[in-house]
Image (cartoon, rainbow, N blue to C red):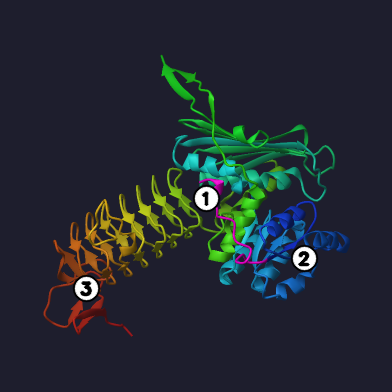
Amino acid sequence: MTASDIIDEPSRSESPTVAVVGCGYWGKNLVRNFHGLGALAAVCDNDPEQGRRIADEYSVPLRAYDDVLADPDIAGVVIATPAVDHARLVKAAILQGKHVFVEKPLALALSDAAELCDLAAAHERILMVGHLLRYHPAFLRLREICSEGQLGRINYIYSNRLSLGKIRIEENALWSFAPHDISMILALMNDVPETVEAVGHSYINKGIADVTTTHLTFASGQAAHIHVSWLHPFKEQRLVVVGDRGMAVFDDSRAWTDKLQTYAHMMNWRNGMPIPEKAEGEPIGLEPAEPLKLECQHFLECLATGATPWTDGQEGLRVLGVLDAAQKSLHDRQAVETSEFRTVEATSFVHPTACVDQPSVIGVGSKIWHFSHVLANSNIGEACNIGQNVVIGPDVTLGARCKIQNNVSVYPGVTLEDDVFCGPSMVFTNVVNPRAHVSRKDEFKPTLVRKGATIGANATIVCGVEIGRYAFIGAGAVVTHDVADHALMVGNPARAIGHMCECGERLPDASETDLACNACGESYRMECGALSRVSKE
């Protein structure tokens, strides 16, 4: 994944319009970028003089926040106000039907952040949090390197975010600097920590930590630590990833040619002693781009397509949970377990060797395992389990609770409804008569697998067919025509030899129209050649 993979710059005539709320230290950069992308409709600011200056500079109106929310032509609001106002402003925008891009943190309280996520889901609004470095070309490439397994298993990550200023009085260095690093670490680990332990010290303003060190431990034994300070003699922005087969360094203070380097260090054992075998750093080529512009482009693309942002509200909630635990640890001077915020929402899991192209949607609670690849514009429902070496997409939709076992490819044109089971190495085709030397991409035929169907190991589903609800395709069968609901299919070409209950047990063979499952007691009736469950009401 590179910066050029995010999106092409939207045309000015097609781009949704937004209003930027807050034109101060950081907001003016958002104004500049959205104006440059042709999407800036208005600005808002509590300081009339500052707001008027920015509005005049970019030739857009200065408007009150309520007026912006009432304007149907403005699709989204971009909030860059002090953090204490985030929850209130985001809630008002969602309730008025606006999509929202809010700078970090999403809110100051976990309960407020959880409520905002619930509101966004209920109103089908996009909620994106400004974790800028997730859109940095160097980080995009670093995550790709980790996903490809080039570093092996990630053992630990550490980050330093240090400078002399900007010193704040409304928040400490942890809340000011660490959200960026927490977001990157959680993305690379594909997990949230079990425990958080932080220490900090105040030297300028009593009670406001100028320097903090936060240690994260994960259930897998992986670890990370984050060192932040605004009382440091020079600027340092460095993220180091240490794997069992290599290491990588993202140093944002260096030139583009050296911002990202990998080290193929190895550890050899001789006479029972570990001996490091050092390697020279290898610079990774990057396409220079402004991360903030890429972030703004991503928000506009999500508005245009309905895709879920990489740093959506749920991601913002996870980051806030770590920050909240770290703040409690600073106060109590002891490690804090994160079970409290881990139960706020159920996260999906993507194994470090798997690759998910964007934009794609991975449902809550879904798991994607080793070496699988989800291509762009795919939509995977909640609580799905995607096994090893599975390819899905592009443009494929899976319902909730689907289970796809190892070595399966779900091609464009295939749709799985809820609760579909695909056995290992089963095959979906996409054209009837493929030739290696003849392109037939315009001849793909759709395949629909209805709710609850099971497809056995090594079976083949020829494209253009519909598999009925709760049908059961036996191992090795080759399906060449539509399959009725509850049908049990075997052979090549597949033929019906009976019927299956919703519970997965074969129904008794009988000539009567009424059938009952011996396993669960469900009753079925055959009418006009189709089997349907008999209502118990």
Element carrying mark 3: loop
Q: Nearer the viewer, residue 214 or 385?
A: 385
What percent of the width, then of the height, locates residue 296? 64, 56
Of 398 and 500, the residue lying toward us: 398
Identity, as a three-letter code, of the amino acid under mark 3: Cys
Which residue position holds label 3?
A: 517
**Vertical position of residue 454 compared to residue 486: above or below:** above
Compute the Cα span from label 3 to label 1.
52 Å
Question: In the image, 218: left or right of 226?
Answer: left
The answer to whether residue 499 is left or right of residue 534 is: left
Residue 60, label in figure: 2
Residue at which label 1 appears: 5
Query: Do we see residue 220 in this rendering?
Result: no
Q: Which mark is residue 496?
A: none
Q: In this orientation, does residue 494 appear?
A: yes
- Report the span colored magenta: 1-17
Q: Quadrant of residue 341?
A: bottom right
Q: Amino acid at mark 1?
A: Asp
Marks 2 and 1, how far apart at CA: 30 Å
Residue, x 50% and y 22% (percent of image)? 279
Residue drawn 51% across the image and 55% down it: 347
Examine the image and state in which quarter residue 197 appears. Answer: top right
- Residue extending farthest to the top is 271
Expressed as whole percent of the image width and height from the top left, the position of residue 26 reads: 75, 52
Q: Main secondary structure of the magenta part?
A: loop
**Counting other residues with Cα less than 10 Å from the Cα at mark 2, is it few (<14), some (14-19), or many (20 or more)?**
some
- Tell whether 288 sits left or right of 459: right
